[in-house]
Amino acid sequence: MKSAAETEPAALTQQARKVIGAQLLVSVLVAGCFLLQGVWESLSALYGGMASVIIALLLRRGVRRASQMATISPKKSMAILYVGAVQRFVLVLGLLALGIAGLKLNPIAVCVGFAVAQVGYLVNTRANVKRATAGKLKNENLQK
C-alpha cells in the first residue's frame, strides 16, 4: 500500500491535467464564439487561450520541482516558486506582445481568450480544492 507522500504527487498531477484540459476546452469554445466574427478573430482568441495554457503548464512544472526540492531545502523550494512566478509574468507579457504587435492578431480577441482561459483555470482549480478538502474531511470522519 502506498503512503500519502507517494500518492499525493500523482493526485496533484492528475488534478493539474484536468484543470489544463478544462482550460483547453474553454479556449476552443471561446475561439468558436469568435469564429462568428471571422477566422482571424477566432485564431486570435485561440492564441490568447493557448498563452494561458502555457502559463499553467509552467506553473505545474514549477510546483512539481518545488515539491521535490521541499524535502531537501525549503528555501530552495520557495526560490523555485518565486523565480517561476517572475518567469510566467514575463512570458505572459512577451506572448501577448508577440501576438498583438508581432503577429498583428486582434487585440480584443487575444485578451478575451487569455482572460477566459485564466478564469477557467481559477474555477477548475477552486473546484478541485473543494473536492480534495471534502474528501479529506470524509476520510477523517470515517477514521474516527
Image: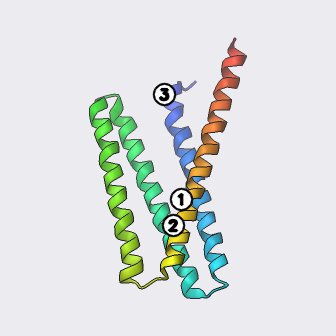
Extreme-front residue of the structure: 108
**CA neighbours of label 2 inside 10 A, class few (<14), some (14 to 19), many (20+):** many
The residues tagged by marks 2 and 3 sit, at their Cα atoms, a distance apart of 34 Å
Left-right relation of 7 to 130: left
Residue drawn at point x = 66 percent, y = 37 percent: 131
Q: Position of residue 95 (x, y in %)?
A: 38, 70
Name the element at disc 2: helix
Task: Confirm or deny contact between disc 3 and disc 1 (CB under 8 A).
Answer: no
Q: Which residue is under mark 2?
A: 114
Residue neighbourhood size for the residue with mark 3, other residues' Cα within 10 Å, grouped as few (<14), some (14–19), many (≥20): few
Label drawn at residue 5: 3
Q: Position of residue 23 (x, y in %)?
A: 58, 60
Q: CA distance from mark 3 to mark 1?
A: 29 Å
Q: Which amino acid is tagged 2?
A: Phe
Counting from the top left corner in percent of width and height, residue 14 is at 57, 45
Q: Amino acid at mark 1?
A: Gln
